[in-house]
Image (tube, rainbow, N blue to C red):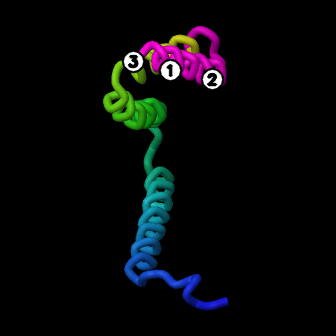
Amino acid sequence: MTDAAFSADRMFVLAVVCMAMFTYALRAGGYWVMGRLPITPRVRRGLESLPGAIIVSTVLPIVLQGGLAVGLCLVVATAVQVRMRKEYIAVFAAAAAAAGLRAAGL
């Protein structure tokens, strides 16, 4: 085997190592801060609302870029999830809605 198969640009390796160190520092720092922060009812409410905020910040750009069909599929998935409380059924319903909407020309 030659070394050429495993060569990498020094700046690329440096960038990856720096990103890994920064990611670890953020995670470790978060645990360190939360270990010293008193969990008041206000802090608890904030922590409990994080998953929803993360989902919205992930899904909203996709919906805005995808247009009406993606928005309607999201509404279908949300309605099925609220009604049936089964994630996989909500995903299948949204996929079926997407197929139907794309077949209809949306």
Q: Amino acid at mark 1?
A: Ala
Q: Callout 2: few (<14), some (14-19), or many (20+) C-alpha neighbours within 10 Å? A: some
Residue that protrudes farthest toward the top in the picture: 83
Q: Which residues are magenta?
A: 82-106
Question: What residue is drawn where x is 48% and y is 81%?
Answer: 8
Q: Amino acid at mark 2?
A: Glu
Decide if residue 46 is in sight here.
Answer: no
| Quadrant, the N terminus | bottom right
Question: What residue is drawn where x is 41% and y is 37%?
Answer: 58
Q: Position of residue 34 (x, y in %)?
A: 47, 50
* Relative vertical location of residue 37 with respect to residue 55 in this rendering, above or below: below
Q: Which mark is residue 87?
A: 2
Quadrant in which residue 26 is drawn: bottom left
Q: Callout 3: few (<14), some (14-19), or many (20+) C-alpha neighbours within 10 Å? A: few
Mark 2–mark 1 contact, CB under 8 Å?
no
* Relative vertical location of residue 68 with respect to residue 66 in this rendering, above or below: above
In the picture of the structure, the residue carrying the numbered disc 3 is 106
Q: Amino acid at mark 3?
A: Leu
In the picture of the structure, the residue carrying the numbered disc 1 is 98
Q: Earlier in the sequence, mark 3 or mark 1?
A: 1
Q: CA distance from mark 2 to mark 3?
A: 25 Å
Residue 103 magenta: yes
Q: Name the foreground residue: 30 vs 53.
A: 53
In the image, which is nearer the foreground, mark 3 or mark 1?
3
Q: Secondary structure at mark 1?
A: helix
Q: Which mark is residue 44?
A: none
Quadrant in which residue 18 is drawn: bottom left
Q: Name the foreground residue: 51 vs 7.
A: 7
Decide if residue 92 is in sight here.
Answer: yes
Task: Determine whether, in the image, residue 14 is placed left or right of residue 94.
Answer: left
Q: Earlier in the sequence, mark 2 or mark 1?
A: 2
Q: Secondary structure at mark 2?
A: helix
